[in-house]
Image (spheres, helix red, strand yellow):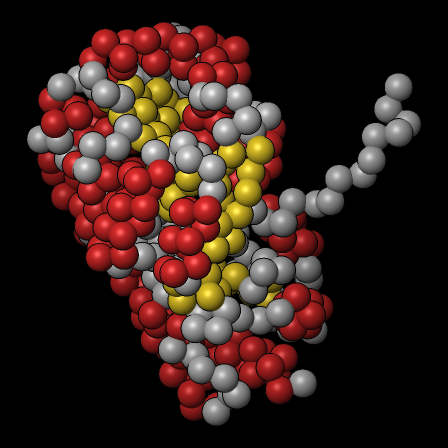
Amino acid sequence: AFADVPLAPPDAILNLSTMYKSDTSDQKVDLGVGAYRDNDGKPWVLPVVRKAEKQIADAQLEHEYLPIAGLKSFTDAAAVLLLGSDNPAIVDQRVVSFQTISGTGANFLGATFLSRFYPKGTLVLLSDPTWANHKNIFNSASLETQDYKYYDPATLGLDLAGMLSSLQDAPSGSIVLLHACAHNPTGVDPTQEQWKRIADVMQAKGHFPFFDCAYQGFASGDLDRDAFAIRYFIERGFECSIAQSFAKNLGLYGERVGCYHVVTRNAAVANQVRSQIARASRAIISNPPLYGARVASTVLNSPTLLAEWKDSLRFMSGRILDMRAELRRLMLEKGTPGNWDHITSQIGMFTFTGLNPEQVNYMVKKHHIYMTKNGRISMAGLSTHNVQHVAQAIDDVVRN
Ligand code: LMR
């Protein structure tokens, strides 16, 4: 029955981790997947997560099913983290929150809901470029996608004029996927002023904002500042969707901890929306997994652990900033042709190096440095031990 199934290409990001693992070179460096590493290249379990895990183990809890919407103490705290506790949308009970299988599950649950209840044929506009999985997710939920201009290769920065005109030219009422902060893969975010201009066009066109928030706390090291765009759009009166992940900021990658939120017009609409998302989520996962949500809930609901978590976020984003400064310094020291300012001006977990697919191929094959084909490197994979080797390799592929 399956003889004609065409072979799908390997995953653009996760396949790199597999390739890295099977590489036997002692020079190998993993700059592929966006996952935090300590200065020895090791995964880092946040101290607050260890403490929460201990509390959970000591409490001898059972393993019953969660409700379809998930662990309420977690989803409520997650909404507060995004919107702020005094946000009128929360106060007026017009935010719908569902626990999901991390950010991917949140995007997919949102896509599924919108494909059923948004006018048929509505386009989902994705930034060019965007996270390698976005198109796959929205297409899997039967939504058509189209690119909007975002990144300007000439300046290695934001093409604001291009972005605004793409949004202007798109059919009214389109769904626009926006990266709330720390844009993946480019590391290029709009400024607060630029967000205002984006909101102006989106409001005039009646577009629907769908925020993907996978890096809150990783862009500026400050959870509130990184939520600016979401809070600003809500303040402007938009209804919106938010896919929220705790993979990176709490380091809960494999536990798959996330939420899908919809900010609606009023509490009655919220109830209607909630009932339909519940049906959709019941079909996909029935009810979400308990363990990671318990860990996140324990951290988010304890003022002491929350404060300690914020320290860890500053620590992680600070180490990434140090690596940005060091990599740029080395490129300048080597006099590598090109402008390397973007290494320090781009933010969050990634740098969009500007290396082309052929150069990336050399980075992998010759230098054992794993990075995505679009030239993205995960800055958390750099350390004081390997940054020299990476700088040398970039210099080599640029010159040759
Ligand atoms: C990434 O972009 O590297 C991460 O979001 C991991 C993933 O799931 O692709």
Q: Nearer the viewer, residue 297 or 268?
A: 268
Check the image and report above or below for 161 versus 249: below
Q: Is 346 on the left or on the right of 154, as rendered?
A: left
Question: Percent x, y for residue 380?
Answer: 42, 60
Res 215 visible: yes
Question: Percent x, y for residue 232?
Answer: 20, 42
Q: Nearer the viewer, residue 267 or 172?
A: 172
Check the image and report above or below for 182 versus 211: below
Q: Quadrant of residue 357?
A: bottom right
Question: Percent x, y for residue 202?
Answer: 33, 41
Residue at point 17% right, 25% down? 89
Check the image and report above or below for 24 versus 16: below
Residue at point 45% right, 17% down? 117
Residue at point 41% right, 32% down? 173
Q: Is 280 on the left or on the right of 268, as rendered?
A: right
Question: Percent x, y for residue 30?
Answer: 55, 60
